[in-house]
Image: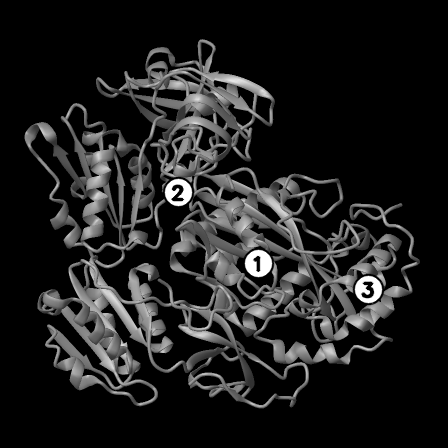
Amino acid sequence: MGLEFNTETFRDDFTFRNSPKAIRRFPFPFPEDSYMYSVNMEPHVPGPKGSVFEHMFDVDEHYLSEMRDRALVLKDDPLRCQSLPHMTLAGWDLLELIMEAKARDYPHWFELHKTGNRWTWINRPMEIEQTFTFLDESTLPYGPMEYITRQTQGDFTLQDQRDNTLWIDAGMVTTQADWSLDFDVGMSFNEWHAPVPLAHQMGVFERALKFLLKLQLGAPVRRFNWTMTVDPLLDTSPENYPKWGPSKATLTPDTVGRRQHLRVELQSLHRLPRSNAIAFPIRAYLIRFEELVSVPKWGRRLHRIIRDIHPDLATYKGFIRNRDMMVDYLAQFDDGQPTSPGWWPED
Amino acid sequence: MSVGAPKIAVTVAEVVEVNELIKRFRFVRTGGGVMPTFSGGSHIVVDMDDHGTRRLNPYSLMSDPADPSSYMISVRRDDQGRGGSLYMHRHVTPGLQMQIGHPVNLFPLDLRGRKHLLVAGGIGITPFIAQMAQLAARGERFELHYAARTRSLGAYMDDLQARYGDRVHLYLDDQGQTLDLKTLLAGQPFGTHLYVCGPKPMLNWVLSTAKAMGWPDGAVHSEEFLAPPVGKPFAVELATSGKTITVDGNQSLLEAIEKAGVDAPYLCRGGACGQCETDVLQCDGHLEHNDHWLTPEQKASNRKIMPCVSRFHGQKLVLDR
Amino acid sequence: MSIVVEGTIPSRPRYGKLTLREGSGHLMVADGEGAEAILELVARAGGAAPGVLAHTHIIYMPGPTGTDMSARLQSLGADAFFRANDYATAQPRLKKVFADAKMGLQIYLTGTEGLIGQAQRDAMEAGLPHTAVQTEFRGSSVRRVQCVHCKGITENVRTDPFQCSHCGLNLFVRDHYSRRHAAFQGVNIDAEDPGQVPPAVERFK
C-alpha cells in the first residue's frame, strides 16, 4: 500500500516530487504555442489508459499526502468548507457520484456495498470503513459533501441552478488558486467570476453559462485552467496570502527551476440527479519547471507561452513579477524547433 | 438530438386507465437494471414510432424519485392534437419496447423555500406528484391545491389525499368549488415559494394575482404543457443541409427536420427552454410563433424561430439547419 | 433603471430607484440621506399617499456622516416609525418584522451601501429572494470591508488602502462584493513586499 502513494509535504519543507510516471502523465494544458481564454469544454469521457482522465476521478501517487494537507488546512480554517442549508441534498448526490465512480474504477482500493439505503464504504488507502444511511446526515461524522471530499483529491464546488444562472452555494476549497470560498459562497456565476480580467468582454462567461444551464445527467464535460505557484504549495488561498505572498519575491535564477511550479487545474462539470445542481471538481496538478522541461516539447512550448502572454493575464494569474526570470530559465530549453499540435509528449 | 446523454431503452411494464381521459404508463429498463435517479419536476422525452411517423413528446415524471425501479408518466388524451397522445392511448401496450431520453428538469423546486405552495389544474398535477414525494421524504413543508372539472377527472385525488392528508386541498368545478387564491396567497409566510402547473387560463390567473399581490418573481414558478399545435402543411428549405422538406399538418417543424435526418438540438420540446432556437435566413410569409422563449422583438424580427412548437405559412422559409 | 455607483466589475452591486409597488404592506429601512428618497417616494404617490402610509412601517437611523432626518420622517405619519441609533440596534426589530411578515410585503432599502447590504442580507436570511427587495443608494459612499485574512469587517472605510480594525493588516479595497457578508473584500496590499504600502487615498466619502 505505502509504495503506491508518496509521503510528501505541500508546506514547510516542501518535499513534494513527481515520479517519472507522474511527469509523463501530467496534464500539460497547452495544445499550441500561445494562450488566450476560451470555453474549451469537451465531454468528460474515459481517456487513454494511464492518463489523468482515464477515470472520472483520478487517484494518483499524491493521494494520501494531499488528503493529509487538506485535513491540516481545515483544522486551521474550517471556513474552507461550507454548504448553505439547501445544498445538503446536492452533497448527497456528490457523495454517491464519487463513491460509485471510485468503487467502479479502482476496485482494489475502494468498495461500496448497498443494502437499500444502508451503505458501507471502504477506502483502503485511507483505512476507512464506514457504514451509514444514505440521505441521513446524522449517520456520518460530517455533512455528505465534506465527508467525501475529505477523501477525494481536488477542490469541489456545488452550484444551484435558479433564475437562469448558477449559484456557488457550497464548496470544499483547500487547494485554490487565490479565491475565497467564504467570501464567494452564495454568489451567482457572473459575480464570482467578476475579478477575472478580459474574459467578460470576450463573452467567454456568457457562452459558458448558457452551455452549463443545459448540462444534462449522464453527460459531464471537462476543461483545463492553469496558473503558476512558487513552491509546491496547494493552499494558495487569499486567507493565507500574507504567508505565501512573500515567497514570490525570493525566487532567484538559481532556484526558479526547482521552486517555480506550473499548476494545472483539471475541471469537470457534472449534473446531479436529486438536487439538479452542478458539481464542479477542480483538481490541481503541480509540476516544477525542472521536471517539466524533461519533456522537450513542453520546455519549448512553455517558454513561448510565458514569453508572449498578455501582461494582464500574467498579472491576474499572479506571476508578472517573476515572468522575466521564468522566461530566461525556459529559454535554454527552447531551440526554436517547431512543436506539434496537441499536448501529448512526443516519444 | 438532445444534447448529451444517450437514450434509454425501455419496455412498457404497465398501462392503467386512470379515468376517461388519462392513462398511466410505467417503463422499466429493457434488459433489467435501474432507471437514473431524477429530481422532482423533471420530464422525459418519449420517442414514438407511430406507424412510420416519428413523434417525440415530453411528459413529466410522476414516479417517486427515490424509486429507481421504473418511471411513470400520465398522458392526457388530446383528440385535436398531432396524434402523439392518441398513439400512446391506442397503441402503447405492456411489452412494447420504446426509447426515452434522460430526465431533464426545467421546473425544479427552489430548495431554499421554507414552504412550497403547489397549485395544479388537471393533468398539471403530474410534476407535483414526484415533487411531493421528494419533499415529504425530506420533511419539507408543502401544500397542494388541486383543481379539476369533476372528481372522476381529478386523477390521483384519492391517492394524494390518502398519502398527504390535510396538506391536500381539492376543488371540483362541477361542485362549484373554487380556490380562494387571494386569501391563500395573503397568508403565506416569508420564504414561501409558489408553483403552478395547469391549463393556460389558470396559469395566467394565478401568475397575475400573485404579481398584483406583490409576490416577487423569484418566488413564483410555473410550467405550461405546450403541445405543438396542428396546422396547414408548409415547405421549408434547410440551407445548411441542402434539403427541402414539407412539414405535415399534424407534425411539428422540429419533427419534420428530424425526419429528414438533420440534427437539431432540443430539451423540452414545448417552446420554453430555448435549446432548439434556429436562425431564419429567409422569410417570405408569416411565422406563427407559439413559444414562450423568444422576446417580442425577436419574434417581430422574423430572424428566429422555435421549431418545436412554431409554424409558418407563406411563400418561402429558409432555416439555418 | 439601474444606477451604477462606480461600475467596474459585475459583482459590484447596482442600485435602482424606489417605486411604490402593490402588496400587503410596505417596509422602508433607511439611514442618513436615504430619508430623502423615502420622502420623494411618498410625494410621488400624490393623493394615494395616505393610503400607502397607513400600511407603511419605517425604520430609520442616522447616517455615518451624521445626517439625521428623523423628525421629517416621523411627521409623515406612517403606521409605524422607529428611530434606531445604528444598524445593530435596528436589527432585532427588523428580524422580528421579517419573521412575522407574509409574502406580499414590499421592502424598500435606501441610504448607504452598508445599510442596504445588511438589511438585504437579513431579508435573504428570512427566506426572501434578494431581488425582491428594492434599493436606492443615497448619501455617503463609505464602505463595509471584510478582511479576507481575519474575517473581521471594518465599518465606514474611507481610504484605500486602510488598516483592518481587527488584525491591523494593510488592506486594499476591492469592488468584489458579497451579499452574504454585506461587505466589499479587503486584501493585504503589502504581502509580497512587507512594509511597502502606498499612501492612502480618500476614495469614499
* Residue with the mark numbered 3: A289
Residue B191, given in percent of the width and then of the height, sits at 27, 57
Q: Quadrant of the C terminus of chain C?
A: bottom left
Tags 3 and 1 both on a single chain: yes
Q: Amino acid at mark 1?
A: Gln
Chain hosting mark 2: B
Q: Is residue A57 left or right of residue B311?
A: right
* A153, B286: nearer the viewer: B286
Place residue A150 in its image quadrant: bottom right
Q: Secondary structure at mark 3?
A: helix
Determine the secondary structure under disc 1: helix
Q: Are marks 3 and 2 on the same chain?
A: no
Query: Of callouts 3 and 1, which one flags the residue occurring earlier in the amino acid sequence?
Result: 1
Q: Residue at x 25, y 34 (%)?
A: B200
Q: Is residue A288 left or right of residue B8?
A: right
Give coordinates of residue B204: x percent, y percent.
23, 40
Residue C103: x percent and y percent? 21, 57
Image x and y of residue A276, in percent: 44, 45
Residue at screen point 39% across, 51% down: A163
Label 1 to label 2: alpha-carbon separation: 24 Å
Q: Is B285 positioned to the left or the right of A200 in the image?
A: left
Q: Which residue is mark 2?
A: B297
Residue flagged by tag 2: what amino acid is it? Glu
* Residue holding disc 1: A201
Quadrant in the picture for residue B295 = top left
Q: Indicate which label's residue lies in the foreground, 1 or 2.
A: 2
